[in-house]
Image (cartoon, rainbow, N blue to C red):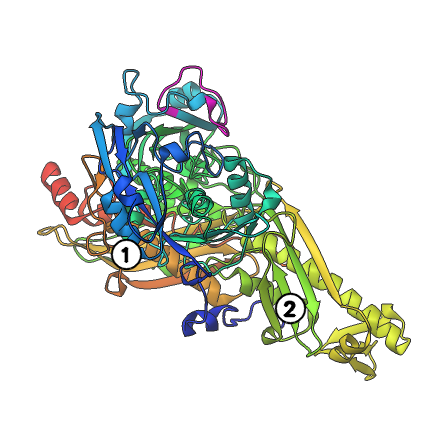
Amino acid sequence: MISYNVIGQPIVRSDGFEKVTGRAQYTGDLKLPGMLWGKVLRSPFAHARIIRVDTSRAVGLPGVHAVLTGDDTRGVRYGRRLFDVPPLAEERVLFAGERVAAVAAESMEIAQNAIDLIEVEYDPLPAIADPLESMKGDAFLLHPDVNDYVGLPKKLEKVSNVFVTNTWGKGELDTGFAQADHILERTYTTPLVHQAYLEPHSCVVFIDEDQRIQIWAANKAPFALRQQLAAAIGVDEDRIRLNPTYIGGDFGGKGSPMDVPLVYFLALHSKRPVRMVMDYVEEFTAANPRHPSVTTVRSGVLNDGTLTAWEARIIFNSGAYGGFKPGVNLGGARDVAGPYKIPHTFVEAIQVYTNSVPGGHMRGPGEPQGIFAGESHLDEIARILGIDPLEFRLKNLVGEGDVTATGSLYRDVKAKETLEAASMAARYGSPLAMNVGRGMAMGARAPGGGETHVGVIFQKDGTVVARTPILDQGTGTYTTVNQVVAEELGLSSDKVQIIPWNTDAVSFDTGIGGSRGTRVASQAAYAAAQNAKQELLRAASEIRGWDPSNLVLKDNKVYKGNTEDYIDFDFVVQNCGFDIQGTSGIEDREQLTVTAFCAQIAEVAVDVETGQIKLLRFTSAHDVGQVLNPIGHQGQINGGVVQGIGYALMEELEVEDGRVSNVTFGDYKIPTMADIPELRTVLVQSKNGVGPYNIKGIGENTNTAVAAAIANAVEDAIGVRVYSLPITAEKVLAALRESNV
């Protein structure tokens, strides 16, 4: 690998000091003159007609400046692509927690008092919580006008609660199953889970004296939000400006407009700035959590362990709306077939409307659900055949020149090397105690594409400012930009300051998500730094009369070739008579032939008397390119594993009669340090990657296979399988009793 000075070094985060000292200002910290508080009244019913909304007492409360119902926002629909979400419910509510009315008042207390004074009369309707029931032909239509929605990928031949279907595959299933010696079919389920970021959804909207809509929001895709809001309310995009703010965690959940359209209407009616911050009861009942799923896998295999056929159907419970997904579908569902060379395959992913909280995105959307089913299924096949799960996977994993089960062809394939590295680090095959087991699972993910811009400006004090439209939601993209600029300009990282742009500054930015941040930001920062460097060298040549083609920038100095004759770059900036800067816009949406493989191995102990699972060790092996920052890279790995542990063993938004019942962190459990085992990491180096540094993504690949690895370890320990997440002590005991083990 190439030797760098700043790239690859474990530098501190660019935004770390502000965050740990409390100087970082989040949306909820913003204070504008005359700002009001917004609050909403939410439906207690999962499905009901709205008969009457009486706001008269709320309107008369001193300090209240606006009270809105669905009549005030009638006909408006918004979303990330599919525009099916109303700011306020109109004739019907479709989930418990849906917004029915909203107020803007001079304090949070007055706003809440006003909400309490609003009277709503409902006519409850039968609620459909189960997507399998919702798919039936006689099910109540939750969105009878779905074919009229903007953004629906394909009009439905017959309107139903199934609104999006995606398929992948190759070969002929009948041929593959006819060739098989064994055919196995199983069904696996995953729950509704919340992203559990620290900062809840929040936004501020202000319509200024020029009638521009000024917005601050905990949203990682501000340019997309500008497009979505403009389309929803029918204004030109240039009337809307998203202003930069810190984002307190995301994990996929901070990409939707959420409350911004509603707060716009509150600001419009009150003629004042309005702030709205969800509390965590609202987050758990009405945000955009990870979709529950029901996956059926049917496979064909030869006696020697060669897979011949793979059929999978994943049914996603989309909840009441589909507007919180940027592509409407969940493309990660295709990973139910994994990185395996199966000749005959068909994968179908279905989105279904139900009367439950709308699903959105969470770290690797669709992948954890699919991989849990697919990798669990692989272990079951191996055990039926009497083949070790490691040997079985190595036999079927793709190698160089192989096409994956869903038709992808990659180069520099490190699938087997990554799995072998994980098995070695985990000491796979070494003796285990009674009721202790090991399980493995595989994943793969290429970094997503997109568009971004970077500006690099030399300062007179010898520092550099890098401008970016990206809002770093916690993954360290600002640090990536810092390191690239510092590397290319021969500076130390502390000489580079990151200042984000608002949406007026550049044409577009895709935003953070899909593991694209480092892919696009590193390329834009590299090009902008190169352009700025050339401008500096040109200015130095004019001051000294040197040949610009013979100048070198290093250590804050411009040298004349290999001589000791130099000029300080701050002197150049101070005396050249013009600003020295470089900009770059990168649009890289190419479908990559490079991917990153991940292999994870869990080791668990199970108490057969109580069903309690103790995670003893967890090993992750990752196929990587150039690691830009080892601290951030390892942080992504550890954080992803911890989220995967929660998904595997404890997390679930429990829904009773259509309502989420565990609405606080006292009841909704996420892992603490007491739940985290010894974590081992091994990196498998690859020479191929994306951009000038040959990078590969790491943010989402780290958590997608965790639950499957733990499920497989549990079966290895006690000989029974749990088919639904989370794998709790109660489910383990039930499985043991049913099997009489």
Q: Is residue 442 left or right of residue 647?
A: right
Kindly report the distance in space between the C-alpha atoms of the residues bearing marks 1 and 2: 42 Å
Residue 156 in magenta stretch: yes
**Mark found first going from the N terminus, 1 or 2:** 1
Q: Amino acid at mark 1?
A: Glu
Q: Tell me the quadrant of the picture where the C terminus can be found.
A: top left
Where's residue 24, x and y in %? 46, 68
Q: Is residue 18 above or below residue 516?
A: below
Q: Residue at x 40, y 39 (%)?
A: 366
Whether residues under marks 1 and 2 lie with C-beta atoms below 8 angstroms apart, the answer is no
Q: Is residue 444 left or right of residue 239?
A: left
Q: Secondary structure at mark 2?
A: strand
Q: Nearer the viewer, residue 205 or 501?
A: 205
Q: Please tell me the numbered disc located at residue 465.
A: 2
List the residue tagged with mark 1.
109
Q: Residue at x 41, y 71 (%)?
A: 22
Q: Secondary structure at mark 1?
A: helix
Q: Would you call the spot at circle 2 few (<14 residues within 10 Å), some (14-19), or many (20 or more)?
A: some
Where are the magenta residues, as a range? 148-162
Q: Is residue 101 above or below residue 283?
A: above
Q: Is residue 634 above or below residue 150?
A: below
